[in-house]
Amino acid sequence: MKIKCLIIDDEPLAASLIEAHVAKVPNLEVIATCINALEGFEILKTHSIDLIFLDIQMPLLTGIEFLKALSNPPKVIFTTAYREYAIESYELEVVDYLLKPISFDRFFKAINKFFKTIESIAPVHTITDSQNTTDFIYVNANKKHHKISFSDIVYAESIKDYIRIHLADKTIVTKEKISEFEHKLPANFLRTHRSYIVNADKITAYTVNDIEIGNIEIPIGISYKKQLLEKLKV
């Protein structure tokens, strides 16, 4: 039995990441992807949906307002960049609350919570290596695809449409937007600034204004500060 999923998210990159995660789980399939709640209403009129991946901050109608308006809603997993809605979301009895960027490991835990709420379907346990997330990434630079282990990445720096990936022993420059690159990284990578992503395992110190990795100082952007500092304290 396939679990029919609906994605409602006004951020195309975030929706694409969820679609990619869903594709790795054999019992799930995406029926539709909507950019706002009103489109979601129309899908629910014509399709039987088992699980909604629902963003909260959206134009026209928030995810919370949308969910409250449904008389008999499917199971819901909130996907959001904002931590402050967590308490209200659990009062709505959602399955889980995922903070963006969503790693596959965290996504998979949420899916197992969902399966546990369905008596007729056993939880998914082991994923084969071909389905699991890997510990490396390939990046295109100088007409070659370079294999880079996540553990070797110190930090990544955006330079317009390019990214400079700083490794322990060298630097690789690839043409890609930092927001797209961020979605390919595991949960231990933190966005500190519109132009920087750091490997949390490499951090040696931090202040309210910057991250230190040895002698390297990386700025913390104002819009990233609150969420980043909360993660670092944890």
Image (cartoon, rainbow, N blue to C red):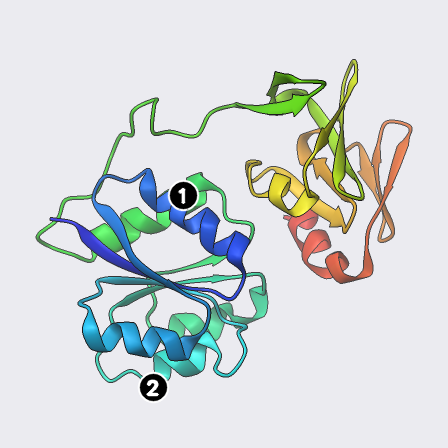
Horizontal side of 188 relative to 166 (left or right) equals: left
Give how far across and how far down residue 118 sits, in percent.
Answer: 16, 56
* Viewer-side residue, 184 vs 108: 184
Q: Is residue 232 above or below residue 152?
A: below
Q: Quadrant of residue 153?
A: top right
Q: Position of residue 128 (x, y in %)?
A: 29, 24
Q: Is residue 230 left or right of residue 158?
A: left
SS type, badge 1: helix
Instruction: Identify which residue is drawn at 28% across, 40% down.
Output: 25
From this view, report whether residue 156 is shown above or below residue 20. above
Q: Is residue 129 above or below residue 158?
A: above
Q: Looking at numbered disc 1 in the image, what kind of residue is underneath it?
A: Ala
Name the mark on residue 20.
Answer: 1
According to the image, label 2 marks what residue? 69
Specify the farthest residue to the left.
120
Local packing at callout 1 (Cα closer than 10 Å; few below 14, some 14-19, many 20+) is: few
Q: Position of residue 125 (x, y in %)?
A: 24, 34
